[in-house]
Amino acid sequence: MPRFSADYILETVLRHPIVPVFYHAEAAYAKRIMQACYDGGLRVFEFTNRGEKAPRFLLSW
């Protein structure tokens, strides 16, 4: 079940039009980057799985 409605997401993106796309293999590092962005006022994030295991991860769904 989605945590946020589509309307809420759209409203948030329109209020905060910067959506950083970020990837880092180390989860703890990625969390620190996300927290820094959040502390700076960003509220919408897109995370991608571009690591070496990404193709295998996607095929396992």
Image (cartoon, rainbow, N blue to C red):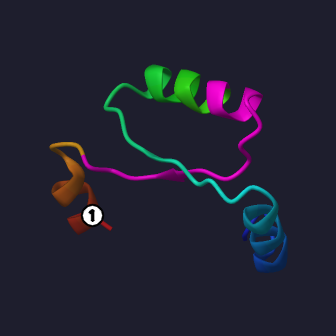
The range drawn in magenta is 36-50
Relative to the observer, which residue lies in front, 47 or 14?
Answer: 14
Q: Nearer the viewer, residue 10 or 51?
A: 10
In the image: residue 5, left or right of residue 18: right
**Taking 54 as reference, is 16 left or right?**
right
Figure check: 58 above or below 52: below
The amino acid marked with disc number 1 is Leu
Q: Which image quarter: residue 56? A: bottom left
Q: Based on the picture, tell me whether residue 40 belongs to the magenta stretch.
A: yes
Residue 45 coordinates in the image, percent (x, y): 59, 50
Residue depicted at 47% across the width and 29% down the height = 30
Magenta residues, dominant SS class = loop
| Quarter placement of the N terminus | bottom right
Q: Which quadrant holds residue 2?
A: bottom right
Residue for point 48% across, 21% down:
28
**What crowding class fits label 1: few (fewer than 14 Cα within 10 Å), some (14-19), or many (20 or more)?**
few
Q: Against 1, is 23 above or below?
A: above
The residue closer to the viewer here, 18 or 53, is 18
Q: Position of residue 47 (x, y in %)?
A: 47, 50
- The residue drawn where x is 64% and y is 24% is 36
- Asked whether 52 or 18 is in front, the reply is 18
Q: How many marks?
A: 1
Classify mark 1: helix, strand or loop.
helix
> In the image, what residue occupies the spot 33% across and 68% down?
61
Name which quarter of the figure residue 6 lies in: bottom right
- Label 1: which residue? 58
Can you name the residue that lies furthest to the bottom here? 7
